Amino acid sequence: MFRIMVDADSCPVKQEVYRVAQRYGAKVILVANSASNIPREDWLELMVVGDHLDAADDWIVENVTKNDIVITGDIPLASRGVKKGARVLSPRGIVFTERSIGDVVATRDLMTHLRDIGVNTGGPPSFDKKDRSRFLQALDSLIRSIQNNK
């Protein structure tokens, strides 16, 4: 059975993950640097890791297995998850794959470089209902894909 691992500290779609996971009977592991209130459910676990930089990312990568789903907006974590064989999904509904992750990492690195040299690159657009809808559709699709490949 697959698990859904959530990079939880700044995840805007936790409630959506709960609904979908409950419908499919999937285990959810929220990985965070600090404790937070979560629903008390057998299928839901909060893993509080150290507060050093990338502690949550490192825990996820060390524990993720093939066909687990990782929910993250963190591009380096997405890349590491894809390399481990996980299905990786952003809160905006973007599925990261072996084919797409290289371009995403390169774009992130370019934007970081531009910001470092003082170019105002702006920021991402506001998170909205369309993003939530896209996320729900993509998560449902990933789960069905995993189930069909058994």
Image: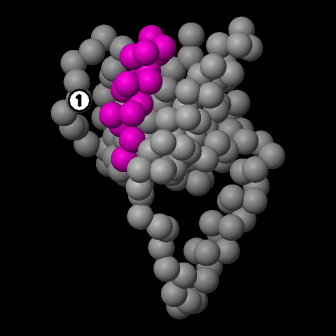
Q: Residue at x 57, y 40 (%)?
A: 89
The three-letter amino acid code for the residue at tag 1 is Ile
Q: Which residues are magenta?
A: 12-28
- Residue extending farthest left: 37
x and y, in percent, of residue 132 in the image: 44, 45
Q: Residues within 10 Å of mark 1 (few under 14, many from 20)?
A: few
Does 35 appear above or below 27? Answer: below
Where the C terminus falls, by quadrant? top right
Q: Residue at x 77, y 42 (%)?
A: 98
| Picture quadrant where residue 144 is located | top right
Residue 3 on the magenta segment:
no
101 horizontally vs 38: left or right: right
Does residue 49 appear anywhere in the picture? no
Magenta part, dominant SS: helix
Does 60 appear above or below 57? Answer: above
Q: Residue at x 72, y 65 (%)?
A: 106
- Residue extending farthest bottom: 118
| Picture quadrant where residue 109 is located | bottom right
x and y, in percent, of residue 145 in the image: 68, 21
Task: Identify the secondary structure beneath mark 1.
Answer: loop
x and y, in percent, of residue 141 in the image: 62, 28
x and y, in percent, of residue 12 in the image: 36, 47
Q: Residue at x 67, y 44 (%)?
A: 96
Compare residues 80 and 120 and report the one nearer the observer.
Answer: 120
- The residue singled out by tag 1 in the image is 38
